Image (tube, grey):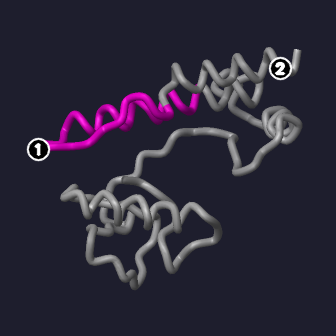
C-alpha cells in the first residue's frame, strides 16, 4: 500500500483511515507492506512500514500541484518552457499524469515475485477519464 500519512504522522483523516484499514486487513491474515515518503517511529506491529528512501522513485514531469485550480494550472502552463508535453487543461494534465503513473505501477507490479494484491479498478486512466467527462458535462 502507498500513502503519505500514517499515525502519529497525520495531518488529516487519511492517516487514521489507513491505520484502520490496514489493522482490519491484518486481522484477516493479510500481510501488508505500507510505503511512506518518510521514516518515523510508528506503533504498528501488524504491518511492515517502509520509508520511500528504501525504494526507487520514478518521477513524472508535471505542472500539477496539490489542490491546484484550473486557473492556477493555466498560469503554470503559460509559464512553462517545455511546449507540447503537458495537458492543455487541468483535466487533460491529470489524465496524462495518470497514464504515466499507471504505466510505472504496472511495470513495477510485473517485476514482483509472489502474491500481490493489486487493484486494477481504482485510479486507472479509464476511470479518471470517466470522471473528467462527467465534470465536463456538469460544467457545460
Total numbered circles: 2
Image height check: is 111 above or below 100? below
* Span highlighted in magenta in the image: 96-123
102 magenta-colored = yes
Q: Residue 138's quadrant in the figure?
A: top right
Front label number (2 vs 1): 2
37 magenta-colored = no
Report the residue marked by disc 1: 114
Give residue 101's position: percent from left, percent from top: 47, 35
Report the residue marked by disc 2: 138
Q: Residue at x 39, y 81 (%)?
A: 42
Give residue 131's position: percent from left, percent from top: 65, 24
Residue toward you, 56 or 140: 140
Image height check: is 85 above or below 72? above
Give residue 132's position: percent from left, percent from top: 69, 23
Q: Residue 38's quadrant in the figure?
A: bottom left
Query: Crowding at label 2, few (<14), some or many (≥20) Cα neighbours within 10 Å?
Result: few
Amino acid at each position: 500500500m502507498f500513502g503519505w500519512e500514517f499515525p502519529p504522522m497525520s495531518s488529516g483523516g487519511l492517516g487514521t483511515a489507513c491505520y484502520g484499514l490496514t489493522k482490519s486487513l491484518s486481522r484477516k491474515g493479510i500481510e501488508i507492506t505500507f510505503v511512506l515518503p518518510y521514516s518515523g517511529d510508528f506503533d504498528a506491529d501488524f504491518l511492515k512500514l517502509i520509508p520511500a528512501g528504501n525504494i526507487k522513485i520514478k518521477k513524472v514531469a508535471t505542472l500539477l500541484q496539490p489542490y491546484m485550480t484550473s486557473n492556477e494550472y493555466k498560469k503554470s502552463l503559460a509559464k512553462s518552457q517545455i511546449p507540447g508535453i503537458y495537458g492543455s487543461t487541468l483535466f487533460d494534465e491529470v489524465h496524462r499524469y495518470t497514464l504515466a503513473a499507471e504505466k510505472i505501477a504496472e511495470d513495477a507490479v510485473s517485476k514482483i515475485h509472489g502474491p500481490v494484491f493489486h487493484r486494477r479498478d481504482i485510479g486507472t486512466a479509464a476511470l479518471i477519464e470517466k470522471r473528467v467527462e462527467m465534470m465536463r458535462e456538469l460544467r457545460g
